[in-house]
Amino acid sequence: MPRRIVQLIVGLFLYGAGCALTVEAGLGVDPWTVFAQGLSVRTGIGIGWVTNIVGFFVLLLWIPLRQKPGIGTIANILLVGTSMQIVLGFLPPVSGLPAQLATLLGGIVLVAVASGLYIGAHFGPGPRDGLMTGMHARLGWPIWLCRALVEVSVLLVGWLLGGTVGIGTVLFAVLIGPLVHVALPLLDTRTTPARVVAERPA
């Protein structure tokens, strides 16, 4: 249990830090961060704080879907945006395409490792993932369709509000799945190291 709690907290903090790197790169971010960025532009509230606020309101959508949050769900709402806001305050400006790409890719890799950490801790899904699984359970729609509908919607609204959509958005979509697929078995607290080695593809 202590290891799982530490892994959850570290994972959520690193997730926010990874998102901060993608924001600072200025080449486009993932759909939910586009949405938070757009709201931040319109309201003047820091993007990290907006991320926390959005997470809370997304959690309210769990009620009609009859989803039950876990400790990890609440921690996600409190820590990811806070971490993003703190890290953005310390990051120096990034200029030049090579530096932007390096920052972007570093952020995506960090988000993938962080996802493996907090998902592998098994304390419940984040509010956004829970929304999609709740839609799947309640409506019977395929997970991929629920994810596509939600993420395309928030991406479009976020872009219209002033969020950054670009090559970074595409790279995030293409790379995050395979990277998490690699990270999760290595960081899953319910998987022993011997089992990971045995199940790792040659």
Image (cartoon, rainbow, N blue to C red):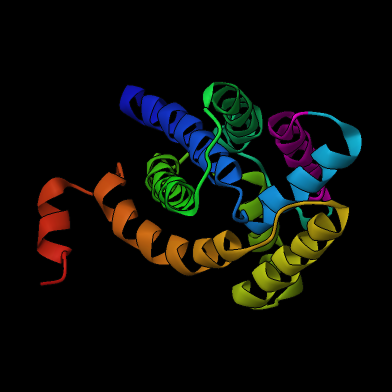
Between 71 and 170, which is closer to the camera in this rendering? Answer: 170
- Magenta: predominant secondary structure element? helix
Indicate yes or no whether the magenta region holds residue 84. no
> Who is closer to the viewer here, 97 or 19?
97
Where does residue 42 sit, x and y in percent of width and height? 90, 40
Image: 15 above or below 167: above
Q: Is residue 3 left or right of residue 154?
A: left
Question: In the image, residue 12 lies at what x, y percent?
Answer: 50, 34
Image quarter hosting the C terminus: bottom left
| Looking at the image, residue 57 lies above or below residue 6 | below
In-image side of 155 versus 179 (left or right):
right
Where's the N terminus, which quadrant?
A: top left
Instruction: Tell whether position 55 is magenta.
Output: yes
Q: Position of residue 96 (x, y in %)?
A: 50, 48
Residue sitting at 43 percent across and 64 percent down? 175
Res 99 seen here? yes
Give the residue displayed 49% in from the left and 54% down from the top: 97
Please say whether residue 58 is visible from this viewpoint.
no
Residue 20: x %, y % from top left:
56, 37
* Residue 14 in the figure: left or right of residue 58: left
**Magenta span covers which residues?**
46-63
Residue at 68%, 72% (x, y): give it: 148
